[in-house]
């Protein structure tokens, strides 16, 4: 298991990274945590001419920025860093809920948040998470910087809005409105494996327990994270009672069209998506009840 020949670059400044990507374009790959790229290179599923290792960029690329209205996660923030940051998890608990399901601690020690998003595996947890949060992607190249909203970032299996000469510089997540409850649920055959399907939910209930706003996205059932618009609209304005949960389950099941592969049939994934949506919404309802009860004490 040895990769093909390539030229290794270890730039220390952002301008150098962007210069290398501009010069080598299609032949180059960025190396962040290496947890997806190195297996691909070692198995020769990918071949490249130039490897641009960004790990020597300064500490500003590995430190999240937490502001009152938003959280910015630059290119070299490791998944494990986020998982252990009380401040980040208080602001965005959904990240912690999902990261616990990503691979194993050893992988998360090196793997970056931005690397997972740039890699865009259809079964990955973080793209679905970003799809229910207000997330903006900042893409940098020698030509300049541009921003892309999450709805336009993921384009197909392992394909994003990133051009070959662009670096995903950072992602910015606006803090969800007060009262938002979040849940991540998935099913994998073994702990740490990529899941057969997963569901991310960000929901805000009003004082009567009725759903005022809700975003639901599924992973593993489409080439990109799939917002479940029919399930979302089915629960809007309703309390999350058993009848509404059953209706959301049915709506979710009907609106996904997954593929059959060696791990599971399309039929199984479709049913699984419905069950995960129902359970995630039930979790959201209990979280909201606990939150309101705690406020009354
Ligand atoms: P790298 O491997 O360095 O890069 C991945 C790709 O993204 C490459 O094409 C690279 O060029 C590109 N890239 C990286 N950073 C940037 C950037 N800033 N700008 C532009 N392009 C960039 N992931 C899951 O989501 N769920 C799982 O259950 C899961 N299980 C795993 C199990 C194992 C055993 C392993 C080895 C990995 C698993 N992963 C899983 C993948 C893991 O989460 C990776 O860390 C992640 O997908 C990629 O992050 P990275 O920083 O390692 O990126």
Image (tube, rainbow, N blue to C red):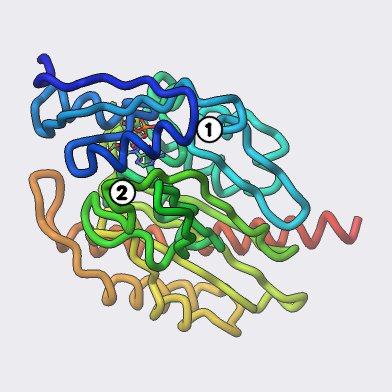
Measured along the vertical axis of the image, is residue 66 above or below residue 209?
above
- Residue 287 lies left or right of residue 55; in this view the side is right
Report the front residue among 264 and 146. 146
- Judge whether residue 229 can be spotted in this image: yes
Compare marks 1 and 2 and give the one earlier in the sequence. 1
Measure the C-alpha gap from mark 1 to mark 2.
17 Å
Q: Position of residue 269 (x, y in %)?
A: 22, 58
Snapshot quadrant of residue 39: top left
Residue drawn at 38 percent across, 24 percent down: 107
Measured along the vertical axis of the image, is residue 55 above or below residue 256?
above
Report the front residue among 156 and 25. 25
Q: Position of residue 105 (x, y in %)?
A: 44, 22
Tell me: is circle 2 under 8 Å from ligand 1. Answer: no
- Judge whether residue 243 can be spotted in this image: no
Snapshot quadrant of residue 5: top left
Considering the image in quadrants, where does the C terminus appear? bottom right
Residue at the limit of the structure toward the right, as seen here: 297
Measured along the vertical axis of the image, is residue 57 above or below residue 295?
above
Residue drawn at 73 percent across, 57 percent down: 69
Mark 1 falls on what kind of element?
loop
Measured along the vertical axis of the image, is residue 141 above or below residue 285?
above
Question: Which residue lies under the disc numbered 2?
Answer: 120
- Residue 187 lies left or right of residue 233; in this view the side is left
Residue drawn at 36 percent across, 47 percent down: 166
Mark 2 falls on what kind of element?
loop
- Residue 141 lies left or right of residue 189; in this view the side is right
Q: Which mark is residue 77?
A: 1
Residue drawn at 40 percent across, 77 percent down: 229
Report the front residue among 125 and 29. 29
Q: Position of residue 232 (x, y in %)?
A: 47, 76
The crowding category of the residue bearing disc 2, from other C-alpha atoms within 10 Å (few below 14, some 14 to 19, many at least 20), is: many
């Amino acid at each position: 298991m040895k990769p093909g020949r390539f030229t290794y670059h270890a730039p220390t400044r952002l301008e150098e990274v962007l210069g290398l990507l501009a010069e080598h374009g299609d032949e180059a790959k960025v190396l962040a945590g290496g947890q997806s790229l190195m297996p691909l290179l070692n198995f020769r599923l990918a071949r490249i001419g130039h490897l641009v290792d960004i790990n020597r960029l300064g500490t500003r690329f590995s430190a999240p920025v937490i502001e009152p209205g938003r959280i910015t996660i630059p290119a070299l923030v490791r998944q494990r860093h986020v998982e252990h940051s009380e401040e980040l998890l208080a602001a965005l608990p959904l990240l912690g809920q999902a990261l616990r399901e990503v691979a194993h601690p050893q992988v998360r020690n090196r793997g970056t948040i931005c690397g997972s998003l740039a890699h865009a595996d259809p079964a990955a947890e973080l793209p679905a998470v970003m799809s229910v949060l207000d997330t903006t992607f900042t893409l940098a190249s020698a030509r300049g910087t541009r921003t892309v909203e999450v709805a336009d970032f993921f384009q197909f299996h392992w394909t994003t809005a990133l051009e070959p000469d662009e670096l995903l510089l950072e992602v910015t997540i606006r803090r969800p409105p007060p009262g938002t409850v979040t849940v991540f649920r998935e099913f994998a055959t073994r702990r740490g494996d990529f899941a057969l399907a997963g569901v991310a939910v960000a929901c805000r209930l009003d004082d009567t327990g009725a759903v005022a706003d809700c975003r639901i996205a599924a992973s593993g059932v489409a080439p990109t994270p799939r917002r479940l618009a029919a399930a979302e609209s089915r629960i809007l304005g309703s309390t999350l009672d058993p009848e509404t949960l059953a209706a959301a389950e049915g709506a979710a099941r009907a609106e996904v069209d997954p593929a059959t592969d060696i791990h599971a049939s399309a039929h199984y994934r479709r049913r699984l998506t419905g069950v995960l949506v129902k359970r995630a919404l039930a979790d959201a309802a209990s979280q909201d009840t606990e939150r309101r009860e705690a406020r009354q004490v």
